[in-house]
Amino acid sequence: MSHPERVIPELILGWREWLALPDLGLPAIKAKIDTGARTSTLHAFYVDTFRRGGQLYARFGVHPLQHRADVVVHSEALVIDQRQISDSGGHREERYIIETRLALAGLDWPIELTLTNRESMLFRMLLGRTAIAGHALVNPERSFVTGRARQPWELYGMNKS
């Protein structure tokens, strides 16, 4: 019995990487690459929904840089689903799911993101295994394999502070 040949991705990621979500106005956000999480998650300190043309949209605010509540990006995206998601502590929460474009290491592809408040968490984003599958492999011993954002606050028009 013959099996179709599997294509092994050439992109290698470390356990944390800088990436961009250009359609959401986020040119740099540090993400934990989390193969233990099925779904990717973006920090949103508020989420409001509204209807446009009969479709449900989310309007949300993001603090993309750790320890920088003064850096705020407001975004909108079409809600493609709502799901019960379990966090790392096993607590279930109904979350809105959006689809957006991930840009990383000169490549980009669509991913699904849940929106939730991650203010108390170290990373503003988790990139889960569904978003990585078929695109990258993860080396958990390495960090920032695809490069570091040198002065990410400048990408948001801010000073270092």
Image (spheres, grey):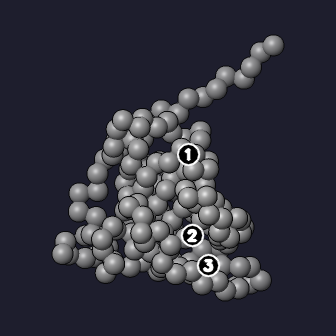
Distance, label 3 to label 2, CA atoms, is 9 Å
Task: Indicate the amino acid at tag 3.
Answer: Ala
Q: Quick check: 89 left or right of 63?
A: right
Q: Residue at x 41, y 37 (%)?
A: 140
Quadrant of image for the N terminus: top right
Task: Indicate the amino acid at tag 1.
Answer: Gly
Based on the displayed image, in which of its 4 quarters is residue 12 positioned? top left
Mark 1 touching mark 2, by CB under 8 A? no
Residue 57: image tag: none
139 w.r.t. 115: above or below: above
Can you identify the residue that label 2 sits on? 115
Residue 104 visible in the shown view: yes
Quadrant of image for the C terminus: bottom left
Could you tell which of marks 1 and 3 lies nearer the N-terminus?
A: 1
Distance, label 1 to label 2, CA atoms, is 18 Å
Residue 58: image tag: 3
54 w.r.t. 156: above or below: below
**Mark in front: 1 vs 2:** 1
Tell me how many marks there are. 3
Residue 138 % position (x, y) = 46, 37
Q: Residue at x 74, y 84 (%)?
A: 53
Mark 3 touching mark 2, by CB under 8 A? yes
Can you identify the residue that label 1 sits on? 36
Q: Residues within 10 Å of mark 1 (few under 14, many from 20)?
A: few
Residue 20 % position (x, y) = 43, 60
Residue 15 % position (x, y) = 41, 44
Mark 2: secondary structure: strand
Q: Quick check: 148 left or right of 117?
A: left
Mark 3: secondary structure: strand
Q: Residues within 10 Å of mark 3 (few under 14, many from 20)?
A: many
